[in-house]
Image (cartoon, grey):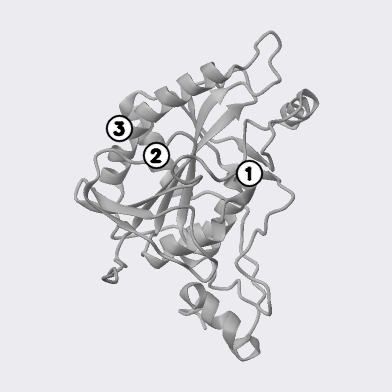
Amino acid sequence: MKKQKIPYDIKIGIIGGSGIYNIEGLQNVKKYSITTPFGKPSDNIIVGEIEGKKVAFLPRHGRGHTISPTEINVHANIYVLKLLGVEFLISLSACGSLKEEIKPRDFVLPDQIYDRTKFRKPTFFGNGIVCHISFAEPFCKNLRELVYSCCKELGIDAHYGGTYVCIEGPQFSTKAESQVYRKLGFDIIGMTAIPEAKLAREAEMCYVTIGLVTDYDVWKENHEVTVEEVLENMRINTEKCKKLIKLIVKKIDVSQRQCFCKDALKYAILTKKENIKKQTYQKLKLLIGKYL
């Protein structure tokens, strides 16, 4: 079998969430099966072109939706996109609304995350290397602004800012939990932004989550969420995403980045190279090589 020649010059990556297993309009499409030092990613990487720009797409839950949120190999997903050269990463994520004014079929561009997960390793580091990244602003402000402007241009009802509370799942919240999250002021709820956002920052990517609202979670009285309703909202959100992704890719200037995301590791690595195990260094060389 002929060995694939992997492209290393793809600046834009897209991770698709529930209901989004492919990106329409991709041209010159190729599939790549790549194994990383962290194992296999969720699926084959789909590489193609939109508006003349190379794009890498990865379905977060695998095609056929076979991977539960806790089981997603996020480390492999982010690593393989970094390997391909991705600097701008757009995450599409179905979510529930915790506020009346955030309606099903709205899009939300959160600026904060609250981590309620329990069983997920949130870092590439450890095993003899200590790294403390800044995570006060978990999403790239510049990329969020660009995405929001694209939503407005297309007439998509979008909310700029808000807090995404990430729960472990795979069960949805109890009513008590949902009410507590509302009292804490959270805006949307989902299961996949952690550790994805943290690992994307460690990989020095500009990362944004587009929350695709499907329902009002379970807090809203006299509004029982049905599977049929969620699936229909998901379908409509997916249709809107097709136009949005095309416009976002068109407007991203891949020639420059003027945010702090690109230098997230510059002063974050506390362990000197001579104190790092050779095996650990080789495993993380893609991330830390330019600094050590």
Vertical relation: 42 (above or below) 188: below
Q: Earlier in the sequence, mark 2 or mark 3?
A: 2
Q: Residue at x 42, y 52 (%)?
A: 89
Name the quadrant of the N terminus. Answer: bottom left
Mark 2 sits on what residue? 147
Q: Secondary structure at mark 2?
A: helix
Q: Secondary structure at mark 3?
A: helix
Rendering quarter of residue 173: top right
Residue 24 in the image, given as x and y percentages of width and height = 28, 38
Q: Do residues under tags 1 and 3 come within 8 Å of each other at their CB atoms?
A: no
Instruction: Answer whether residue 290 is visible to the viewer in this image.
Output: yes
Q: Earlier in the sequence, mark 1 or mark 3?
A: 1
Is residue 192 toward the left or the right of residue 11 in the image?
right
Q: Residue at x 69, y 8 (%)?
A: 222
What's the mark number on residue 113? 1
Rendering quarter of residue 256: bottom left
Q: Residue at x 62, y 21 (%)?
A: 216
Could you give the CA–CA distance between mark 2 and mark 3, rounded to whole angstroms? Answer: 12 Å
Front residue of 13/75: it is: 75
Q: For the residue marked with disc 1, what is the amino acid?
A: Ile
Q: Secondary structure at mark 1?
A: strand
Q: For the residue marked with disc 2, what is the amino acid?
A: Val
| Residue at the far front in the pictured view | 1
Is residue 249 toward the left or the right of residue 70 in the image?
left
What's the mark number on residue 102? none
Mark 3 sits on what residue? 243
